[in-house]
Image: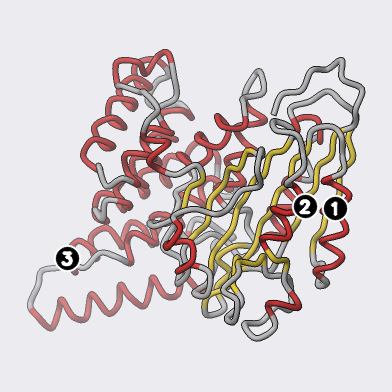
Amino acid sequence: MHINGRDRRRGHVLLIAGDAAVHRRTVRLAPGANLAALAMVPAGLLLGSELPSDTVYLDGAREPNTVLACLRTAARTPGPLLLYLSGRLTADRRGHRLHLALPGSTPGTVRYTALAWDWLTGELRERPAGTTTLLLDLAADKEAWPLLREHGTLPAPPGAEMYGVVAPPGPPTAPVTAPGAVSGYTRHWIDQLRRAPARPSDVQLHTLAAGSAGLAPGTLVLPTARELDAQPAAPRALPDGDPRPRLHALATAGRHTEAAELARSWERHLLDTAGPGSPEALRCTEIRADLARMAGDFALATALWTAAVRARLAAQGATAPEAHDAAAGALYCWTRLKDPVRAMTSGTELLGLLRALPAFDPHHLRLTEQRLEALGSAAEGAGIPQG
């Protein structure tokens, strides 16, 4: 949303954190952490506007009428509006209406303790076209997901631009990060916003973030993967544009071979222009690893993520968040390896790298050690050579 700087209206940023998405005590989405990260970004940069603006943070609100009141105030803003929502998307069992769950919402109390999605669209309905951006980082529960699959999208307010992701229910299927960590989509959205010499458009921010975030298979991307896939890109154009939106579109459409070929072309370009030890080339290795994960090639994904951990440790040290992210990706993919010989071979090196990260979750470290011990015992019993 780009507004003429001579316009004297005020802008508004409303950031809402709903209920966390949790599966068997594992936090899949921590909306409070996302809000805390966005709070560090100037409101003008979030809005893409030089207008004076107001910012409201709602984290931990348990009363839907409180959220609705803030929403109504935001909707009355005559200038540009950015509304960010993060948390668990649910539905009431009686009316089958979508809601943003708030802390304390339960399946039986959704209608009274959560923010109805049609309240949100209704409040924003009268805003002028081109003045409203809705940014979403959500995880659907088992009540909401069938409704999303039925319609293939999430209803947007008329005249508003809506970008974001909705993860499917169930256990985490993307690399596990530390509890309370900023989610991949929001983190990369912020990173792209800060790194660009000139502010990208919201659709550019969205496509770059979605293409870099390592989204779980089945994630609903808004705009949809079909729309992303329509964006032109080709390996020969790698020096004139960023291929990550195209990579994501190909992978989510199941065109994994094309995605892998494009990623390798991009990597060769970066090796030639930036060098093998450059941050750009290293990030490309991680993207190739995530594409392999999405394609179900966990052996290649483990090898690429492990190489990224080694490089991150050498370049940035054991406390770098990027090293921990790469380690989480490697560990996730390694646990999916079915071949015991491959798992033992790659797991031995991985365990050594995990031990070099002092802040790595000790629970995951113990599970890695236990799996390696079990694999070794099974191999010994079967007479399989080790080492």
Along the polypeptide, which appears first: circle 2 or circle 3?
Answer: 2
Quarter of the rendering containing residue 85? bottom right
Are the residues tagged 2 and 1 within 8 Å (C-beta)?
yes
Residue at the spot 30% in from the left edge and 62% down from the top edge: 347
Residue at the spot 25% in from the left edge and 64% down from the top edge: 337
Measure the alpha-carbon separation of dots 2 and 1.
6 Å
**What percent of the width, then of the height, locates residue 241?**
44, 19
SS type, badge 3: helix
Q: Is residue 286 left or right of residue 387?
A: right
Query: Looking at the picture, which amino acid does disc 2 mark?
Result: Glu
Tell me: residue 349, above or below residue 110: above
**What percent of the width, then of the height, locates residue 26?**
55, 73
Measure the alpha-carbon separation of dots 2 and 3.
58 Å
Crowding near pointer 3: few (<14 within 10 Å), some, many (20+)? some
Measure the alpha-carbon separation of dots 3 and 1.
59 Å
Does residue 365 show up? Answer: no
Along the polypeptide, which appears first: circle 2 or circle 1?
Answer: 1
Say which residue label 2 marks. 123
**What percent of the width, then of the height, locates residue 297?**
24, 53
Nearest the viewer among 341 and 302 is 302
Tell me: residue 72, above or below residue 374: above
Query: Looking at the picture, which amino acid does disc 1 mark?
Result: Arg
Say which residue label 1 marks. 72
Q: Is residue 19 left or right of residue 53?
A: left
